[in-house]
Image (cartoon, rainbow, N blue to C red):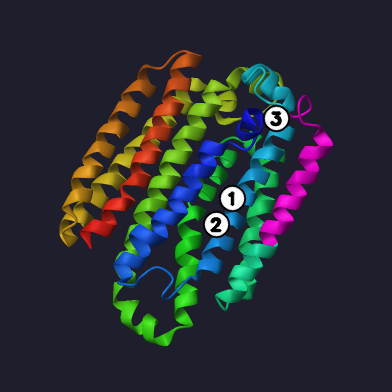
Amino acid sequence: MKQFLKLIRWPNLVIILMTMCFTLFFVVNPLLGLKAFDAGLTVTGFVLLVLATLFIAVGGYLINDFFDMDIDRINKPGKNQVGRKYPVAYIQLSFWILNIVAVIMGFIVAWMAGRPMYGLVFFFTAGLLWFYSERYQCMPLVGNLVVAFLSTLSFALVWLFDFFTLVNNPVAFAYAQTSFPIVNKMMLIYMGFAFVTSLIRELVKDIEDVEGDQRYGCNTFPVRFGIKVTKITGVIVLLAGLALSAWAQMFFQTIGFNILFFWFLAIDIEFIIVLVLLVKAGEKRHFSTLSVLIKILMLTGILSMIFVYFEV
């Protein structure tokens, strides 16, 4: 069981689950002035949306381990169990089953929202994860940007399908529409935060794995341009994150969200700590520590959504 939980990256799945639940219950519904499931996404729709997202994520982790079997013998000795504890055929079959079920559930959610063609979002997401593992992760910066983009979907999908389900309820839609601008800004803040933190973590992980990537011809950003240039790029991304946080704080101050304003001061400090440690980092263990700290930064950002509920 322990090895299986590692295989499916259970901490990442918990973060995805928290993100989607917090987005709906602590941000979107309170800001719209609606109770959960009274309008917008139904219980069934939300559960299917979460399961579809989690299944696609697990499928992506499995296929990534499949394509990384050789590289991980150097980068993560003993951690990749594909081809050892878990047969390759089992991983491939699991990938297809998980994604087929996820896409079906996604189309059901889209149909319930009155936008059946939006189910294609799940199809393309599953395909993008395949191409990421098979090709994009070894293309300088392309793979990093793909992962950063996909990390924003946990926020975007909840608001997207909640909005279109709400459209089908004219009374609730008319009541809530004056709050759409503030919801859109909040979603931009959290999606931007997810993009920046995921991008910097991917760059740090690529530096950490540079030895194995070089040996197997995986042309990641640090392999192509060197660790120094990658660190400079990481500093620029972190400064962009700080700028985003500062803009968010000004917005929170404008609308009177004081708790969030001060919570984001802690996020500012975490950004600065990561930035300083990135500049000083020189050994693999330093980058491993940075990867953990960036995850803590991600979690700090997600937890901040709880306070939206109390600020409204």
For image coordinates 65% across by 23% down, the residue present is 79
Q: Position of residue 234 (x, y in %)?
A: 42, 31
As drawn, the residue found furthest toward the front would be 1
Inter-mark Cα distance, 1 to 2: 6 Å
Quarter placement of the N terminus: top right
> Is residue 251 placed above or below 200 in the rendered structure?
below
Tell us which disc is closer to us: 1 or 3.
Answer: 1
| Residue 54: mark | 1
Rendered-image quadrant of the C terminus: bottom left
Looking at the picture, which amino acid does disc 2 mark?
Val
Left or right, residue 273 beside residue 311: right
| SS class, disc 1 | helix
Mark 3 vs mark 2: give the one in front.
2
Location of residue 53 in the rendering, given as x and y in whole percent from the top left corner: 58, 54
Residue stretch rendered in magenta on the structure: 82-103
Q: Main secondary structure of the magenta part?
A: helix
Residue at position x 29%, y 40% from top?
242
Asked if residue 96 is among those painted magenta in the image, a careful observer would answer yes
User: Residue at 59% across / 62% down in the picture?
Assistant: 48
The reply to whether callout 3 and callout 2 are in contact (CB within 8 Å) is no
Q: Residue furthest bottom?
A: 170
Residue wearing tag 3: 68
Compare marks 1 and 3 and give the one earlier in the sequence. Answer: 1
Q: Are marks 1 and 2 in contact (CB under 8 Å)?
A: yes
Residue under numbered circle 2: 50
Query: Dot 3: within a 10 Å radius of its alpha carbon, few (fewer than 14), some, or many (20 or more) residues?
Result: some
Image: 288 above or below 141:
above
Residue 36 in the image, given as x and y percentages of width and height:
40, 68
Secondary element at tag 2? helix
In this picture, residue 228 sits left or right of residue 251: right
Outermost top residue: 283
Crowding around mark 1 (Cα neighbors within 10 Å: few <14, some 14 to 19, many 20+) is many
